[in-house]
Image: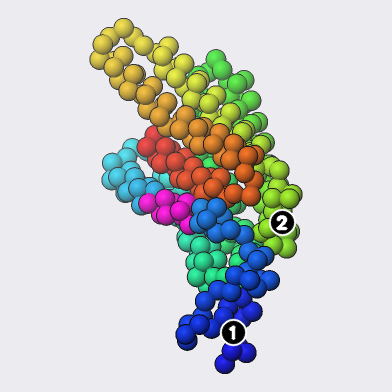
Amino acid sequence: MDSYIPTNLTANGGKLIPDLTSPAATALPPLDGTYGAILLGTFFNVILCGVEFHQVYQYARGHFDDTNLMRCFVAFLAIVDGLGTALAIHMCYWFLVTNYFTPKLITVVWSMKIQGIVDTVVVFACQCFFVRRVYLIGRRFRFLVWFIMVLILGEVALASVSYIEIFLIPNILEYRKYALCDPAAYALAAAADVMLTSLLIFELHRSRTGFKRTDSTIDVLIAYAITTGLITALFNVYCVVIALVEPDNWVYIASDMFTTKLYVTSTLAA
């Protein structure tokens, strides 16, 4: 019977337990800062996914005057972001249950490859939504809006390079040796968010009329713009710092998953 036990497991009292001295076990990364971080990120991912579906439900009930294009956009966000959540769940199950403490724990599963691409598509769609809004409101600053769009396209390009590397590497431990694009992509995303939020706040401030009721509404819109726009920028800055200071720690990946959900909830709330 023992001959069928994997090399990284030993029999103890009829139970199979990990053998921490085996070559397979010593090759595995520490779980707390890697798969543990991704697991926690997936937990928050699922929670915010429920919030998003509630937002979509409320939108479907109360926004009958929106165009078909906007309705399709909301449906697209809900479906694609829901797919990203499903991929994150599969990734955690494959790593931490199906292949717990086996050499496959360092291989790159297909859901991990696709999940990053899906998140990039979602973030790009949300940022384009806010770019369009600022473009329509602040006609005087359209040249800045085009510059922000260049930043967003640069962010997507850097993220694409990173995902190509994930498809090519033999195992996940090799990723940090080659992926230098993640911090730069997060930095461009943060810069785009700050500029979009600043332009929106400036235009709202210029729209004050002097009437107390109207100005009170504008103050609420400004507060909303700050809380929804800058919070994604802060999380992107956090991802930059973690990715540079601790490149072998996957906390920034978990934060990236959470930030993607914040983009969607901010867009649906708008």
| Quarter occupied by residue 252 | top right
Which picture quadrant has residue 67?
top left
Compare residues 210 and 176 and report the one nearer the observer: 176
Q: Nearer the viewer, residue 255 or 81?
A: 255
Position of residue 220 measured from the top left corner of the image (x, y, whole percent): 32, 23
Look at the image and give the residue range highlighted in magenta: 39-47
Which secondary structure is most common in the magenta stretch?
helix
Q: Judging from the image, what secondary structure is the residue with disc 2 in?
A: helix
Q: How far is the residue under mark 1 from the one under mark 2?
A: 28 Å
Determine the residue positioned at 34% across, 9% down: 209
* Amino acid type assigned to the residue bearing label 2 in the image: Glu
- In this view, the residue farthest toward the left is 213
- Residue 140, position as x, y percentages in the image: 55, 15
The amino acid at mark 1 is Ile
On residue 163, the disc is: none
Q: Is residue 215 visible?
A: yes
Q: On the image, numbered disc 1 is attached to which residue?
A: 5
Quarter occupied by the N terminus: bottom right
Left or right: 34, with 74 as reference point: right
Residue 260 visible in the shown view? no
User: Does the magenta run of residues contain 41?
Assistant: yes
**Was residue 16 drawn as part of the magenta stretch in this picture?**
no
Which residue is disc 2 drawn over?
174
Mark nearer the N terminus (1 vs 2): 1
